[in-house]
Image (cartoon, helix red, strand yellow):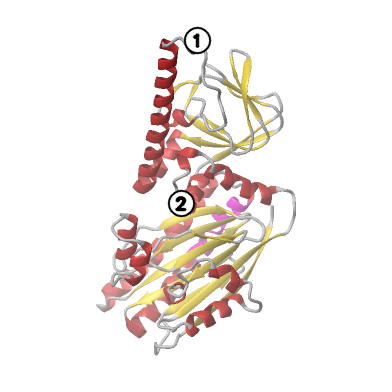
């Protein structure tokens, strides 16, 4: 599906500051939108944010072929290449600001959050405490995490989100561009759907948006959405520079793929193994999956074969069979193969498409890389896996007790439902 993005962008000095250290880019030709918030005082902060923005713009232009390739082919490999291109662009900005610091004996830096639009995807890059939000069907989702001491304490469970809002460490950065030659860059390839909105915000805005539910109303208040957000921040105090970039995705053709984009993320969210992940983490998981389609009657997996893939049904229906006998059907959101992610073993059942079916496939290798990249994701997934194994152990023990009492023949198994998995 093709998309057009309409962009509203604005920045303001706020009510308390004398100069504006924020900077934004809204480059429709490159498909690049960016917010940077400078650090180091009026001159240093202004220079750092503008310098970083210029370097990212130039670097994205040099890598235009990578994003053009992604627009043509949204495979997992193309998404990974685009994420690398965004990371390299942000790293180039970090190195440039750092070199300027060394050459002039200064200590300036900047946050930076950017989006590159390519076909039906938005590729995000993020360092610091500016934010990128996704507004989808009235819901607001954080696609970035603040790189601050307070946010780190929230993630570790040492502080609540409400406590973090009042903490003196709320604005103390753990990552920024310029303090070192390189920096860890968070990236994400997000599949867009019709009527999605993305909000890029400096902390001078989102400090006045503690209740995410207010964001859709401000975006839809009429007129210039970016200016409406800035007016809200200034009316609430305007303690810092305020910058907002609002992107709205509109489908140029309607072939059903926009609906499928929502179905894909919904399917991921229904997998118990991934249910404890945040929306951002689920979107990151979706980004490393591949898509496989099957015709009616086609085998998806065969009983007795070995592999290590988790399948998630997006559209269509499949039949689960053992020794030629069908004992379950799975529709959208159904899944099979969770245990294959941790154990390379024989499939205990055959799965066959009953109608044209699209599935997401998550490989053991892709899941392993995701878990190593973010240990918190790893802990959540492993905890869900332990819970699932514990539940099955209790069920098996109960069946064994019943069998010993003679209440259930030993050949009877508990019925399979769509929340179970096929190894």
**Which mark is on residue 209?**
none
The x and y percentages for residue 172 are 30, 70
SS for tag 2?
Answer: loop
Q: Which residue is nearer to you in this view: 411 or 255? A: 411
Q: Which mark is residue 409?
A: 1
Q: Is residue 365 left or right of residue 250?
A: left
Q: How many neighbours does mark 2 have within 10 angstroms: few (below 14), some (14-19), or many (20 or more)? A: some
Residue receiving disc 2: 278
Q: Is residue 154 above or below residue 7?
A: above
Whether 33 is drawn above or below 413: the answer is below
Q: Quadrant of residue 393?
A: top left
Q: Give the Cα separation between the discs numbered 2 and 1.
A: 43 Å
Residue 379 is left or right of residue 25, and the answer is left
Upstream in sequence: badge 2 or badge 1:
2
Q: Residue at x 40, y 40 (%)?
A: 381
Residue 372 image position (x, y, % from top left):
36, 43
Query: x%, y% of residue 218?
Result: 58, 74
Residue occupying image coordinates x 61% and y 69%: 28
Q: Whole-percent x and y of residue 305?
A: 52, 19
State the extent of the magenta-drawn residues as a range.
Answer: 58-71
């Amino acid at each position: 599906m093709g998309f057009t993005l309409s962009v509203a962008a604005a920045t303001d000095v706020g009510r308390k500051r004398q100069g504006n250290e924020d900077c934004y880019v809204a480059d429709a030709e490159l498909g690049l939108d960016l917010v940077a918030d400078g650090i180091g005082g009026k001159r240093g902060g202004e220079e750092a944010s503008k310098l970083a923005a210029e370097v990212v713009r130039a670097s994205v232009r040099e890598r235009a072929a990578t994003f053009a390739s992604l627009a043509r082919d949204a495979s997992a490999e193309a998404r990974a290449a685009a994420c690398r291109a965004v990371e390299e662009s942000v790293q180039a900005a970090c190195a440039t600001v750092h070199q300027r610091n060394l050459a002039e004996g200064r200590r300036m830096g900047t946050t930076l959050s950017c989006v590159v639009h390519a076909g039906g995807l938005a590729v995000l890059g993020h360092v610091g405490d500016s934010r990128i939000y996704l507004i989808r069907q009235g819901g607001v989702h954080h696609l970035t995490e603040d790189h601050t001491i307070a946010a780190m304490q929230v993630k570790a469970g040492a502080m609540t989100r409400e406590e973090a809002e009042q903490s003196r460490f709320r604005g103390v950065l753990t990552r920024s561009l310029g303090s070192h030659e390189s920096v860890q860059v968070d990236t994400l390839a997000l599949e867009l759907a019709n009527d999605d909105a993305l909000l890029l915000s400096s902390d001078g805005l989102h400090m006045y948006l503690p209740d995410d539910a207010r964001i859709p109303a401000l975006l839809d208040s009429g007129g210039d959405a970016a200016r409406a957000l800035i007016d809200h921040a200034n009316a609430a105090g305007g303690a810092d520079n305020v910058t907002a970039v609002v992107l709205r995705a509109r489908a140029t053709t309607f072939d059903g793929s926009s609906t499928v984009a929502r179905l894909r993320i919904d399917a991921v969210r229904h997998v118990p193994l991934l249910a404890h992940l945040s929306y951002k983490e689920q979107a990151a998981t979706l980004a490393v999956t591949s898509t496989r389609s099957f015709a009616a009657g086609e085998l998806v997996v065969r009983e007795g074969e070995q592999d290590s893939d988790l399948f998630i049904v997006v559209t269509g229906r499949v039949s689960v069979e053992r020794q030629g006998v069908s004992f379950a059907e799975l529709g959208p959101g159904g899944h099979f193969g969770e245990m294959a992610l941790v154990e390379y073993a024989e499939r205990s059942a055959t799965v066959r498409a009953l109608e044209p079916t699209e599935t997401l496939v998550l490989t053991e290798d892709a899941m392993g890389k995701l878990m190593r990249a973010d240990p918190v994701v790893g802990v959540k997934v492993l905890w869900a896996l332990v819970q699932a194994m514990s539940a099955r152990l209790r069920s098996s023990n109960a069946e064994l007790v019943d069998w010993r009492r003679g209440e259930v023949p030993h050949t009877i198994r508990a019925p399979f439902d769509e929340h179970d998995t096929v190894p």
